[in-house]
Amino acid sequence: METTVKTSNKTLFLLQGLVFSALGIIMILFPATLPAIMSIVIAVALFITAISAIWAYVQSRKKEAKNEWYLIVGSIVAVGLGIWLIIDSKLLLKLLAIAIGVWMLIRSIQIIGTAITMKSFGAIDWLWFILVGLVTGLFAIIFLTSPEAMGTGTMVLAGVALLLVGIYYFVLLFQKKTTNIIIKS
């Protein structure tokens, strides 16, 4: 049995590189105002979600005698979290720090794995991938160990980390066109 894996998805690498680089640049340029704006946007999204869940509950009660109480409970939780985000925007920073930390830890492991794979194929620039993976992992540990300390400086660090991940995808974009890996069993 033979399996061929082709890594030639240039459009996906370009899109990911652009998105991560743009997010990184935005976080570097607007570290102080970004959390407050994000808190308001997420709170509004939670309010809209709550209203739609209440509407779905009312509609289901009209059609059938279903007991969909979980829609009301979810709405109350969404409204409460939305109000909390508007009152205390630092809550979003803590949640964001944890989410970014977990994501960056997973991404750093993936980047290091890519570097090890590149080394086995004889790529010359695999050491740069190891470096980017280690720096991304370091940022992940910072975010996970002290999410309450996420402030302007940390937003800039997160922006730098996202920019590094964007550069990683651009480097992948300009690598050899295709790599065929043949696994025989």
Image (cartoon, helix red, strand yellow):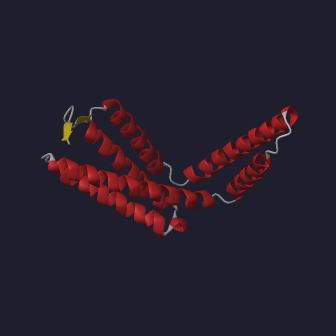
Residue 131 spot, x, y in % from top left: 25, 57
Q: Which residue is drawn at 54% across and 56% down?
A: 96
Q: In this view, does 38 lie to the left or right of 99?
A: right
Q: Which residue is drawn at 34% across and 55% down?
A: 108
Residue 112, can we see it? Answer: yes
Determine which quarter of the picture holds residue 47. Answer: top right
Which of 53/171 is in front? 53
Q: Residue at x 20, y 36 (%)?
A: 179
Q: In this view, does 84 lie to the left or right of 139?
A: right
Residue 145 spot, x, y in % from top left: 47, 69
- Looking at the figure, which quarter contains the C terminus? top left
Residue 33, can we see it? Answer: no
Which of 138/59 is in front? 59
Residue 161 spot, x, y in % from top left: 38, 53
Residue 149 spot, x, y in % from top left: 52, 67
Instruction: Please determine whether, in this image, residue 56 is positioned above or below residue 157.
Output: above
- Looking at the figure, which quarter contains the N terminus? top left
Instruction: Please determine whether, in this image, residue 104 is positioned above or below residue 5.
Output: below
Q: Which residue is drawn at 74% across and 44% down?
A: 50
Image label count: 0
The furthest residue to the bottom: 145
Determine which quarter of the picture holds residue 95. Answer: bottom right
